[in-house]
Image: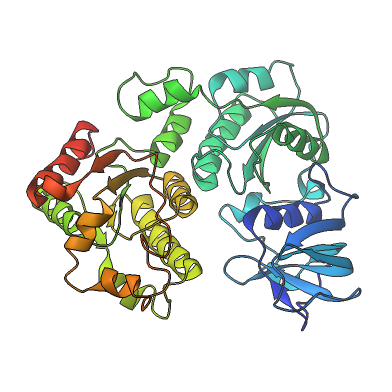
Amino acid sequence: MAAEPTPGPALTPDPITLTTIELALLGIAVPGAVAPPPAVAVELDPQPGKKPAPGTELTITDTEGAPVAVVTVESATTRKRRLTVKGTVRRAAAATDDGEPRGAYAAHRKTPEQVRLAGAAAVVTRDPVDLRTLVAATAKAGQPVLLIVLDGPRAVPGPDAADVVSATLTLRDRLRREGRRADLVVVPAPQYGDDRDDDLAERIAVAYGGTRVVPAEPPPAEALRDWLDGTAAEPADWPSASRHAWRRWRPLPHERGLVLLFTGLSGSGKSTIARAVTDRIAEIGTRTVTLLDGDVVRRNLSAGLGFSKEDRDRNVERIGFVAAEIAKHGGIAVCAPIAPFAATRARVRSMVEAHGDFLLIHIATPLAECERRDRKGLYARARAGEIPEFTGISSPYEEPDDADLVLDTTGLSIIAARDAVITLLDQGGRL
Protein backbone atom coordinates (compact mmCIF):
# COMPACT_ATOMS: atom_id res chain seq x y z
CA MET A 1 0.00 0.00 0.00
CA ALA A 2 1.36 3.42 -0.93
CA ALA A 3 1.98 6.00 1.78
CA GLU A 4 1.71 9.76 1.49
CA PRO A 5 5.04 11.60 1.99
CA THR A 6 5.27 12.47 5.65
CA PRO A 7 5.87 15.83 7.33
CA GLY A 8 8.91 14.22 8.97
CA PRO A 9 12.50 14.29 7.71
CA ALA A 10 13.18 13.73 4.02
CA LEU A 11 16.50 12.11 3.17
CA THR A 12 18.22 11.43 -0.16
CA PRO A 13 20.44 8.34 0.14
CA ASP A 14 23.38 7.37 -2.02
CA PRO A 15 22.51 5.43 -5.21
CA ILE A 16 23.27 1.97 -3.77
CA THR A 17 21.09 2.59 -0.72
CA LEU A 18 18.30 3.96 -2.91
CA THR A 19 18.24 0.85 -5.13
CA THR A 20 18.38 -1.34 -2.01
CA ILE A 21 15.20 0.35 -0.81
CA GLU A 22 13.59 0.05 -4.26
CA LEU A 23 14.32 -3.69 -4.28
CA ALA A 24 12.76 -4.02 -0.83
CA LEU A 25 9.62 -2.41 -2.26
CA LEU A 26 9.59 -5.27 -4.79
CA GLY A 27 9.98 -7.82 -2.00
CA ILE A 28 13.62 -8.61 -2.83
CA ALA A 29 16.37 -8.46 -0.24
CA VAL A 30 19.95 -7.65 -1.16
CA PRO A 31 22.75 -10.01 0.00
CA GLY A 32 23.50 -9.47 3.66
CA ALA A 33 20.05 -8.05 4.48
CA VAL A 34 19.11 -8.46 8.15
CA ALA A 35 15.52 -9.52 7.43
CA PRO A 36 13.17 -10.12 4.50
CA PRO A 37 11.36 -7.11 3.00
CA PRO A 38 9.54 -4.93 3.89
CA ALA A 39 12.20 -4.75 6.63
CA VAL A 40 15.29 -2.72 5.75
CA ALA A 41 18.53 -1.74 7.40
CA VAL A 42 20.16 1.10 5.54
CA GLU A 43 22.79 3.79 6.05
CA LEU A 44 21.75 7.39 5.49
CA ASP A 45 23.28 10.83 5.87
CA PRO A 46 21.78 12.11 9.13
CA GLN A 47 20.29 15.54 9.59
CA PRO A 48 22.65 17.63 11.74
CA GLY A 49 22.23 16.84 15.41
CA LYS A 50 19.21 14.60 14.90
CA LYS A 51 18.58 10.88 15.29
CA PRO A 52 15.06 9.74 14.41
CA ALA A 53 13.11 8.15 17.25
CA PRO A 54 11.28 4.84 16.85
CA GLY A 55 8.02 5.41 15.01
CA THR A 56 9.40 8.31 12.98
CA GLU A 57 8.51 8.14 9.32
CA LEU A 58 11.33 9.10 6.95
CA THR A 59 10.52 10.08 3.38
CA ILE A 60 13.17 8.70 1.02
CA THR A 61 13.68 10.76 -2.12
CA ASP A 62 15.65 10.28 -5.32
CA THR A 63 18.42 12.66 -6.40
CA GLU A 64 15.85 15.03 -7.89
CA GLY A 65 13.88 15.19 -4.63
CA ALA A 66 10.94 13.05 -5.76
CA PRO A 67 9.52 10.80 -2.99
CA VAL A 68 10.26 7.11 -3.53
CA ALA A 69 9.48 5.41 -0.23
CA VAL A 70 8.53 5.94 3.39
CA VAL A 71 10.55 4.15 6.08
CA THR A 72 9.00 3.68 9.52
CA VAL A 73 11.90 3.67 11.96
CA GLU A 74 12.20 0.82 14.45
CA SER A 75 15.70 1.72 15.65
CA ALA A 76 18.47 4.13 14.68
CA THR A 77 22.15 4.39 15.53
CA THR A 78 24.83 6.87 14.53
CA ARG A 79 28.51 6.08 14.07
CA LYS A 80 31.23 7.99 12.26
CA ARG A 81 28.75 10.52 10.89
CA ARG A 82 26.56 7.77 9.43
CA LEU A 83 23.00 7.01 10.42
CA THR A 84 21.92 3.36 10.34
CA VAL A 85 18.16 2.94 10.30
CA LYS A 86 16.25 -0.29 10.77
CA GLY A 87 12.57 -0.30 9.94
CA THR A 88 9.89 -1.17 7.44
CA VAL A 89 9.50 0.37 4.02
CA ARG A 90 6.50 1.07 1.82
CA ARG A 91 6.15 2.93 -1.44
CA ALA A 92 5.45 6.65 -1.30
CA ALA A 93 2.17 7.56 -2.98
CA ALA A 94 3.90 10.36 -4.88
CA ALA A 95 6.47 7.91 -6.25
CA THR A 96 4.10 7.13 -9.10
CA ASP A 97 2.31 9.23 -11.67
CA ASP A 98 -1.03 7.75 -12.76
CA GLY A 99 0.26 4.44 -11.47
CA GLU A 100 3.39 4.42 -13.63
CA PRO A 101 6.86 3.89 -12.14
CA ARG A 102 9.58 6.48 -12.77
CA GLY A 103 12.52 6.08 -15.13
CA ALA A 104 13.14 5.31 -18.78
CA TYR A 105 11.01 2.47 -20.17
CA ALA A 106 8.57 2.87 -17.28
CA ALA A 107 6.14 0.40 -18.85
CA HIS A 108 8.68 -2.38 -18.27
CA ARG A 109 9.37 -1.50 -14.61
CA LYS A 110 6.89 -3.97 -13.15
CA THR A 111 6.60 -5.87 -9.91
CA PRO A 112 7.10 -9.65 -9.77
CA GLU A 113 3.33 -10.05 -9.44
CA GLN A 114 2.76 -8.11 -12.67
CA VAL A 115 5.32 -10.07 -14.70
CA ARG A 116 5.81 -13.43 -13.03
CA LEU A 117 6.78 -15.89 -15.77
CA ALA A 118 6.75 -19.21 -13.95
CA GLY A 119 9.37 -21.74 -15.01
CA ALA A 120 11.24 -19.24 -17.18
CA ALA A 121 14.86 -19.27 -18.18
CA ALA A 122 15.90 -15.90 -16.77
CA VAL A 123 18.64 -13.88 -18.45
CA VAL A 124 19.79 -11.29 -15.91
CA THR A 125 21.98 -8.59 -17.40
CA ARG A 126 23.29 -5.08 -17.00
CA ASP A 127 25.00 -5.07 -20.40
CA PRO A 128 23.85 -5.76 -23.98
CA VAL A 129 23.21 -9.49 -24.49
CA ASP A 130 25.31 -11.56 -26.91
CA LEU A 131 24.05 -14.39 -29.10
CA ARG A 132 25.70 -17.13 -27.02
CA THR A 133 23.68 -16.06 -23.98
CA LEU A 134 20.50 -16.04 -26.04
CA VAL A 135 21.21 -19.54 -27.38
CA ALA A 136 21.84 -20.81 -23.85
CA ALA A 137 18.56 -19.29 -22.66
CA THR A 138 16.57 -21.00 -25.40
CA ALA A 139 18.25 -24.40 -25.10
CA LYS A 140 15.20 -26.02 -23.53
CA ALA A 141 12.40 -26.30 -26.07
CA GLY A 142 9.20 -24.57 -25.06
CA GLN A 143 10.65 -22.95 -21.93
CA PRO A 144 9.65 -19.28 -21.63
CA VAL A 145 12.43 -16.69 -21.52
CA LEU A 146 12.46 -13.69 -19.20
CA LEU A 147 14.97 -10.97 -20.00
CA ILE A 148 15.78 -8.97 -16.85
CA VAL A 149 17.71 -5.72 -17.32
CA LEU A 150 19.25 -4.32 -14.15
CA ASP A 151 19.27 -0.55 -13.71
CA GLY A 152 21.30 1.05 -10.95
CA PRO A 153 24.73 2.30 -9.89
CA ARG A 154 27.51 0.44 -11.66
CA ALA A 155 30.80 -0.74 -10.21
CA VAL A 156 32.07 -1.37 -13.75
CA PRO A 157 31.33 1.40 -16.31
CA GLY A 158 29.08 0.44 -19.19
CA PRO A 159 26.11 1.49 -21.30
CA ASP A 160 23.12 3.30 -19.84
CA ALA A 161 20.23 1.07 -18.86
CA ALA A 162 17.98 2.76 -21.43
CA ASP A 163 20.29 1.69 -24.26
CA VAL A 164 20.55 -1.84 -22.86
CA VAL A 165 16.75 -2.09 -22.63
CA SER A 166 16.38 -0.85 -26.20
CA ALA A 167 18.82 -3.48 -27.46
CA THR A 168 17.28 -6.25 -25.36
CA LEU A 169 13.77 -5.47 -26.57
CA THR A 170 14.88 -6.36 -30.09
CA LEU A 171 15.93 -9.78 -28.77
CA ARG A 172 12.61 -10.24 -26.99
CA ASP A 173 10.78 -9.44 -30.22
CA ARG A 174 13.04 -11.86 -32.11
CA LEU A 175 12.14 -14.65 -29.67
CA ARG A 176 8.45 -13.88 -30.03
CA ARG A 177 8.69 -14.04 -33.83
CA GLU A 178 10.25 -17.49 -33.39
CA GLY A 179 7.21 -18.57 -31.38
CA ARG A 180 8.83 -18.40 -27.95
CA ARG A 181 7.04 -16.96 -24.95
CA ALA A 182 9.28 -14.09 -23.91
CA ASP A 183 9.04 -11.00 -21.76
CA LEU A 184 11.29 -8.21 -20.47
CA VAL A 185 11.40 -6.39 -17.15
CA VAL A 186 13.61 -3.57 -15.83
CA VAL A 187 14.62 -3.94 -12.18
CA PRO A 188 16.52 -1.45 -9.98
CA ALA A 189 19.64 -3.08 -8.57
CA PRO A 190 23.09 -2.01 -7.42
CA GLN A 191 26.28 -3.51 -8.80
CA TYR A 192 28.87 -4.39 -6.16
CA GLY A 193 31.66 -5.72 -8.34
CA ASP A 194 32.00 -8.97 -6.35
CA ASP A 195 30.21 -12.27 -5.65
CA ARG A 196 27.15 -10.45 -4.32
CA ASP A 197 26.22 -9.57 -7.91
CA ASP A 198 25.60 -13.22 -8.83
CA ASP A 199 23.68 -13.78 -5.58
CA LEU A 200 21.46 -10.77 -6.21
CA ALA A 201 20.86 -11.75 -9.86
CA GLU A 202 19.58 -15.15 -8.75
CA ARG A 203 17.32 -13.61 -6.09
CA ILE A 204 15.79 -11.29 -8.67
CA ALA A 205 15.34 -14.08 -11.21
CA VAL A 206 13.59 -16.32 -8.67
CA ALA A 207 11.33 -13.46 -7.54
CA TYR A 208 10.14 -13.03 -11.14
CA GLY A 209 9.50 -16.74 -11.65
CA GLY A 210 12.79 -17.91 -13.11
CA THR A 211 13.82 -21.51 -12.47
CA ARG A 212 16.98 -21.46 -14.59
CA VAL A 213 19.28 -18.44 -14.42
CA VAL A 214 21.38 -17.74 -17.50
CA PRO A 215 23.97 -15.10 -16.57
CA ALA A 216 24.86 -12.70 -19.36
CA GLU A 217 28.62 -12.49 -19.18
CA PRO A 218 30.18 -9.21 -20.32
CA PRO A 219 32.61 -9.54 -23.24
CA PRO A 220 36.33 -9.89 -22.45
CA ALA A 221 37.49 -6.45 -21.37
CA GLU A 222 40.52 -6.30 -23.64
CA ALA A 223 38.64 -7.42 -26.76
CA LEU A 224 35.83 -4.99 -26.01
CA ARG A 225 38.25 -2.10 -25.46
CA ASP A 226 40.16 -2.82 -28.68
CA TRP A 227 36.96 -2.87 -30.72
CA LEU A 228 35.58 0.28 -29.13
CA ASP A 229 38.90 2.05 -29.71
CA GLY A 230 38.83 1.04 -33.36
CA THR A 231 41.87 -1.26 -33.26
CA ALA A 232 40.03 -4.60 -33.59
CA ALA A 233 37.27 -6.04 -35.75
CA GLU A 234 33.63 -5.85 -34.78
CA PRO A 235 32.59 -8.88 -32.67
CA ALA A 236 30.61 -11.36 -34.73
CA ASP A 237 28.69 -12.98 -31.86
CA TRP A 238 26.78 -9.89 -30.75
CA PRO A 239 23.46 -8.88 -32.30
CA SER A 240 23.59 -5.58 -34.15
CA ALA A 241 21.38 -3.89 -31.53
CA SER A 242 23.80 -4.96 -28.80
CA ARG A 243 26.78 -3.65 -30.75
CA HIS A 244 24.93 -0.37 -31.21
CA ALA A 245 24.35 -0.06 -27.45
CA TRP A 246 28.05 -0.60 -26.75
CA ARG A 247 28.99 1.96 -29.39
CA ARG A 248 26.48 4.47 -28.03
CA TRP A 249 28.30 4.23 -24.71
CA ARG A 250 31.78 4.56 -26.19
CA PRO A 251 32.02 6.12 -29.63
CA LEU A 252 35.33 6.04 -31.49
CA PRO A 253 38.02 8.16 -29.78
CA HIS A 254 37.61 11.16 -32.09
CA GLU A 255 33.88 11.31 -31.21
CA ARG A 256 34.12 10.27 -27.57
CA GLY A 257 33.76 12.74 -24.72
CA LEU A 258 37.01 13.67 -22.97
CA VAL A 259 38.05 15.51 -19.83
CA LEU A 260 41.54 16.95 -19.51
CA LEU A 261 42.30 17.69 -15.86
CA PHE A 262 45.39 19.82 -15.30
CA THR A 263 46.68 19.69 -11.73
CA GLY A 264 49.60 21.48 -10.10
CA LEU A 265 50.62 24.13 -7.61
CA SER A 266 49.52 27.73 -7.84
CA GLY A 267 51.87 29.42 -10.32
CA SER A 268 52.87 26.15 -11.99
CA GLY A 269 51.49 27.29 -15.35
CA LYS A 270 48.54 24.90 -15.51
CA SER A 271 45.91 27.57 -16.24
CA THR A 272 48.00 29.18 -18.97
CA ILE A 273 48.67 25.82 -20.63
CA ALA A 274 45.03 24.76 -20.26
CA ARG A 275 43.91 27.93 -22.00
CA ALA A 276 46.48 27.46 -24.78
CA VAL A 277 45.35 23.84 -25.29
CA THR A 278 41.70 24.94 -25.41
CA ASP A 279 42.51 27.57 -28.01
CA ARG A 280 44.48 25.10 -30.13
CA ILE A 281 41.65 22.51 -30.08
CA ALA A 282 39.24 25.26 -31.14
CA GLU A 283 41.62 26.20 -33.98
CA ILE A 284 41.81 22.60 -35.20
CA GLY A 285 38.03 22.71 -35.32
CA THR A 286 37.16 19.01 -35.16
CA ARG A 287 35.91 18.97 -31.56
CA THR A 288 33.72 21.08 -29.29
CA VAL A 289 35.78 22.28 -26.31
CA THR A 290 34.92 24.04 -23.03
CA LEU A 291 37.39 25.55 -20.54
CA LEU A 292 36.44 25.28 -16.86
CA ASP A 293 38.95 27.33 -14.91
CA GLY A 294 39.68 30.29 -12.71
CA ASP A 295 37.33 33.12 -11.86
CA VAL A 296 34.61 31.89 -14.22
CA VAL A 297 34.23 28.69 -12.19
CA ARG A 298 34.46 30.46 -8.84
CA ARG A 299 31.88 33.03 -9.89
CA ASN A 300 29.35 30.82 -11.67
CA LEU A 301 29.81 27.33 -10.24
CA SER A 302 31.41 27.61 -6.83
CA ALA A 303 30.18 30.96 -5.52
CA GLY A 304 30.20 31.00 -1.73
CA LEU A 305 32.90 28.37 -1.31
CA GLY A 306 36.02 29.21 0.65
CA PHE A 307 39.44 27.59 0.61
CA SER A 308 39.14 25.02 3.40
CA LYS A 309 39.94 21.41 2.48
CA GLU A 310 36.23 20.63 2.35
CA ASP A 311 35.44 23.60 0.13
CA ARG A 312 38.37 22.91 -2.19
CA ASP A 313 37.21 19.31 -2.53
CA ARG A 314 33.68 20.51 -3.23
CA ASN A 315 34.95 22.95 -5.86
CA VAL A 316 36.88 20.22 -7.70
CA GLU A 317 33.94 17.83 -7.51
CA ARG A 318 31.60 20.46 -8.95
CA ILE A 319 34.01 21.06 -11.80
CA GLY A 320 34.22 17.27 -12.27
CA PHE A 321 30.44 16.90 -12.36
CA VAL A 322 30.03 19.55 -15.07
CA ALA A 323 33.01 18.19 -17.01
CA ALA A 324 31.59 14.66 -16.87
CA GLU A 325 28.28 15.93 -18.28
CA ILE A 326 30.15 17.63 -21.13
CA ALA A 327 32.03 14.40 -21.84
CA LYS A 328 28.81 12.35 -21.67
CA HIS A 329 27.51 14.36 -24.61
CA GLY A 330 30.67 14.07 -26.69
CA GLY A 331 32.46 17.31 -25.84
CA ILE A 332 35.93 18.02 -24.51
CA ALA A 333 36.20 19.73 -21.11
CA VAL A 334 39.53 21.28 -20.10
CA CYS A 335 39.85 21.90 -16.35
CA ALA A 336 42.70 23.44 -14.37
CA PRO A 337 42.01 23.50 -10.63
CA ILE A 338 44.90 22.90 -8.23
CA ALA A 339 43.14 19.63 -7.24
CA PRO A 340 45.71 18.81 -4.55
CA PHE A 341 44.14 15.62 -3.16
CA ALA A 342 44.45 12.22 -4.84
CA ALA A 343 41.10 10.94 -3.55
CA THR A 344 39.23 13.90 -5.05
CA ARG A 345 40.96 13.48 -8.41
CA ALA A 346 40.03 9.78 -8.32
CA ARG A 347 36.37 10.63 -7.73
CA VAL A 348 36.41 12.97 -10.72
CA ARG A 349 38.06 10.27 -12.84
CA SER A 350 35.33 7.82 -11.83
CA MET A 351 32.56 10.28 -12.72
CA VAL A 352 34.06 10.96 -16.13
CA GLU A 353 34.94 7.37 -17.07
CA ALA A 354 31.31 6.32 -16.63
CA HIS A 355 30.77 7.77 -20.12
CA GLY A 356 34.00 9.23 -21.49
CA ASP A 357 37.78 9.39 -21.32
CA PHE A 358 39.84 11.08 -18.63
CA LEU A 359 43.42 12.32 -18.97
CA LEU A 360 45.35 13.71 -16.02
CA ILE A 361 48.07 16.26 -16.81
CA HIS A 362 50.45 17.00 -13.93
CA ILE A 363 52.15 20.36 -14.23
CA ALA A 364 55.04 19.41 -11.97
CA THR A 365 56.77 22.79 -11.72
CA PRO A 366 58.74 22.83 -8.42
CA LEU A 367 57.53 24.90 -5.47
CA ALA A 368 60.58 27.18 -5.59
CA GLU A 369 59.89 28.11 -9.20
CA CYS A 370 56.20 28.69 -8.44
CA GLU A 371 57.17 31.03 -5.61
CA ARG A 372 59.63 32.87 -7.84
CA ARG A 373 56.86 33.57 -10.36
CA ASP A 374 54.33 34.68 -7.74
CA ARG A 375 53.30 38.11 -9.01
CA LYS A 376 50.36 38.35 -6.59
CA GLY A 377 52.49 37.65 -3.52
CA LEU A 378 50.28 34.77 -2.41
CA TYR A 379 53.13 32.51 -1.33
CA ALA A 380 54.72 35.28 0.73
CA ARG A 381 51.42 35.95 2.45
CA ALA A 382 50.96 32.22 3.07
CA ARG A 383 54.42 31.92 4.62
CA ALA A 384 53.59 34.90 6.81
CA GLY A 385 50.49 33.09 8.03
CA GLU A 386 48.06 35.50 6.36
CA ILE A 387 46.51 32.82 4.13
CA PRO A 388 45.58 29.61 6.00
CA GLU A 389 45.65 26.17 4.34
CA PHE A 390 47.60 27.33 1.29
CA THR A 391 48.57 24.43 -0.95
CA GLY A 392 52.30 23.73 -0.89
CA ILE A 393 52.89 25.81 2.25
CA SER A 394 50.40 25.02 5.00
CA SER A 395 48.35 22.40 3.15
CA PRO A 396 49.77 19.41 1.29
CA TYR A 397 49.82 18.77 -2.43
CA GLU A 398 49.59 15.06 -3.17
CA GLU A 399 51.55 14.48 -6.36
CA PRO A 400 49.71 12.12 -8.72
CA ASP A 401 51.21 8.74 -9.58
CA ASP A 402 48.62 8.15 -12.32
CA ALA A 403 49.25 11.14 -14.57
CA ASP A 404 49.04 10.57 -18.32
CA LEU A 405 51.52 13.39 -18.93
CA VAL A 406 53.97 15.19 -16.62
CA LEU A 407 55.32 18.61 -17.56
CA ASP A 408 57.77 20.86 -15.69
CA THR A 409 57.47 24.37 -17.08
CA THR A 410 60.68 25.63 -15.45
CA GLY A 411 62.47 25.60 -18.80
CA LEU A 412 59.52 24.84 -21.06
CA SER A 413 57.66 27.41 -23.12
CA ILE A 414 53.88 27.58 -23.12
CA ILE A 415 53.82 26.64 -26.81
CA ALA A 416 56.02 23.57 -26.20
CA ALA A 417 53.85 22.49 -23.26
CA ARG A 418 50.70 23.05 -25.31
CA ASP A 419 52.05 21.00 -28.19
CA ALA A 420 53.00 18.14 -25.86
CA VAL A 421 49.36 17.90 -24.76
CA ILE A 422 48.05 18.17 -28.33
CA THR A 423 50.46 15.39 -29.37
CA LEU A 424 49.07 13.19 -26.58
CA LEU A 425 45.54 13.78 -27.87
CA ASP A 426 46.53 13.24 -31.48
CA GLN A 427 48.34 9.95 -30.73
CA GLY A 428 45.20 8.68 -29.03
CA GLY A 429 43.09 9.50 -32.09
CA ARG A 430 41.07 12.02 -30.08
CA LEU A 431 41.24 14.93 -32.52
Q: Which residue is pictured at 61% across the width and 24% down the height?
A: 178
Up the image or down, 158 lies above or below 6; here it is above
Up the image or down, 334 lies above or below 54; here it is above
**Residue 345, percent across and down?**
43, 51
**Residue 27, percent across and down?**
84, 50
Q: Choose top left, top right, bottom left or bottom right for residue 106.
A: bottom right
Q: Which residue is pictured at 73% across the width and 62% down the height?
A: 80
Count of picture labels: 0
Up the image or down, 315 lies above or below 429; here it is below
Q: Is residue 269 visible?
A: no
Q: Of all residues shown, which one is farthest toward the front?
A: 384
Q: Nearer the viewer, residue 37 or 16?
A: 16
Quadrant of the frame with the C terminus = top left
Task: Left or right? Give the position of 256 relative to 162.
Answer: left
**Residue 25, percent across and down?**
79, 56
Q: Nearer the viewer, residue 146 or 393?
A: 393
Q: Is residue 167 visible?
A: yes
**Residue 359, percent across and down?**
32, 43
What colouring method underlies this structural image? rainbow
Quadrant of the frame with the N terminus = bottom right
Q: Which residue is pictured at 54% across the width and 24% down the height?
A: 130
Q: Nearer the viewer, residue 92 or 79?
A: 79
Q: Which residue is pictured at 10% across the width and 51% down the height?
A: 414
Q: Choose top left, top right, bottom left or bottom right for residue 169.
A: top right
